[in-house]
Image (cartoon, rainbow, N blue to C red):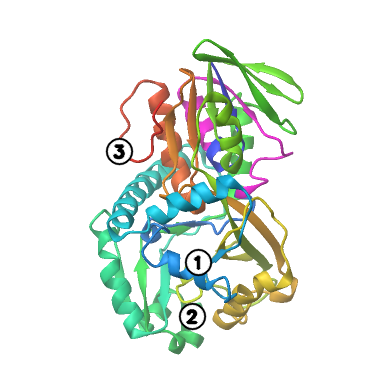
Amino acid sequence: MKALVLGAGIAGITTAYELNRDGFEVTVIDREAEPASFTSYSNAGLFAPGHAYAWSSPAAPGILLRSLWKGDQALRFKFSTDPRFWRWMWRFWGECTAERAALNTKRKVRLCNYSLSVFHETVARTGVAYDGRKGGLLYLYRSEAALKAASAKSRILSDNGCRIETLDRDGVAKADPALEPVKTQFAGALYAPDDESGDCRLFARNMGTWLQGQGVKFSFNTTVTGFEKTGDRVAAVRTGKGRMEADVFVLCLGVYSPHLAKELGHELPIYPVKGYAITAPVAGRNNPPAIGGVDEETLVAYAPYGDRVRATATAEFSGYKREFKPSDFSTMLSTMKALFPDGADWSKASYWSGLRPMTPEGTPILGPSKMKNLWFNTGQGHMGWTMSHGASRITADLIAGKAPEIPLEGMVIAA
């Protein structure tokens, strides 16, 4: 049978892998020239079940409101005239109760832990290189009060399969010796020994090459413009290069998924949340981070990738614009210079911004559409790297008529 995967970001690439593994003749379509050239291009790279908290929390509305006059907030809100934006924000606001935040966090961490196990199977089977780094991740706190509160909050993760340890500042330096010179800045950290990091873009591109060797075809520089339907099935997709037929279709187009899904009668609750990233070469510096982590005061996430260091920050609710200015990177750059002053050549950092495909709950949209042969695997948001492997295995299992290995409550759109 022929399968057509729409999108070559990390969700599309892992979907192609799973369908090829199940014996499908797979073709992947993407409007860019290479895999992982949009949202998956420069993400944080943290494979982080130990940080799978829902963004929609009781604290979120206050942070967003303060961002209207304070530029240093981790969540930023900008006014928009887009009706879809306001509908999405209204739903997000509705998820910001303690009860909903706890439920959404449990669902996220369950998927993330499952995805980590699938990821390990995939890497063992394919040998795809991605500048991976095991050894856990550090979630750093500057005050004893914040560390104590975080330790209590983390019980929702440890109760749902994550190993979480509380470290003092000496424990932080032991976990990552690069932080020894600055350990007095911190009261301590939560340490998730099973969390990892790696370059999502490198993985996606190397996996694309591996898949081509398995017979998977790619149609790059190809924009999907719509569908041809026959009754309750999709017969073909229309593209700028003509129509493409298949037996099975999977929609993995991130922030652009709602535009096409609307043609099928779906209003997908996905909207872009903008993030910013810097990547700097190690370039002979002698104290780069040994493992990745998050400075929880500034919410700057970082990870070492071979000969470079990546840092990401900010969740900006501002629509589809990807423009940026130097001041957008000031907090993360100053944070990284303070944490790892000799960890990279910060003067030669490259800058990027991207659009995370967020749902109000923070969980992806999986499962069947109103068309019997089109499936959703989209909306992984800020944890696309972490969730994608499990979400794609679930997608392939659903297509094959198998029961997924984890419950899917809150992740399936009614057909």
Q: State the CA–CA distance, disc 1 to disc 3.
A: 33 Å
**Which residue is outermost to the left?**
159
Residue that mark 1 sits on: 64
Give the camera-side residue of 289 and 71: 71
Q: Position of residue 22 (x, y in %)?
A: 45, 23
**What span is colored magenta in the figure?**
14-39
Is residue 120 depicted above or below 194 in this figure?
above
What secondary structure is marked by label 3? loop
> Residue at left 57%, top 83%?
338
Q: Which of disc 3 and disc 2 is earlier in sequence?
A: 2
Residue at 72% over, 59% down: 323
| Residue drawn at point x = 46 percent, y = 37 percent | 125
In percent of the image, x 75 and y 34: which residue is there? 221
Quadrant of the image containing the C terminus: top left
Looking at the picture, which amino acid does disc 2 mark?
Leu
Q: Mark 1: which amino acid?
A: Leu
Q: Residues within 10 Å of mark 2 (few under 14, many from 20)?
A: many
Which residue is identified by label 2?
179
Does the stretch in magenta take in 75? no
- Secondary structure of residue under mark 2: helix
Q: Secondary structure at mark 1?
A: helix
**In the image, what residue type sits under mark 3?**
Ile
Residue 231 makes an appearance in the image: yes
The x and y percentages for residue 117 are 37, 45
Residue pointed to by mark 3 = 406
In this rendering, the answer to whether 24 lies above or below 174 is above
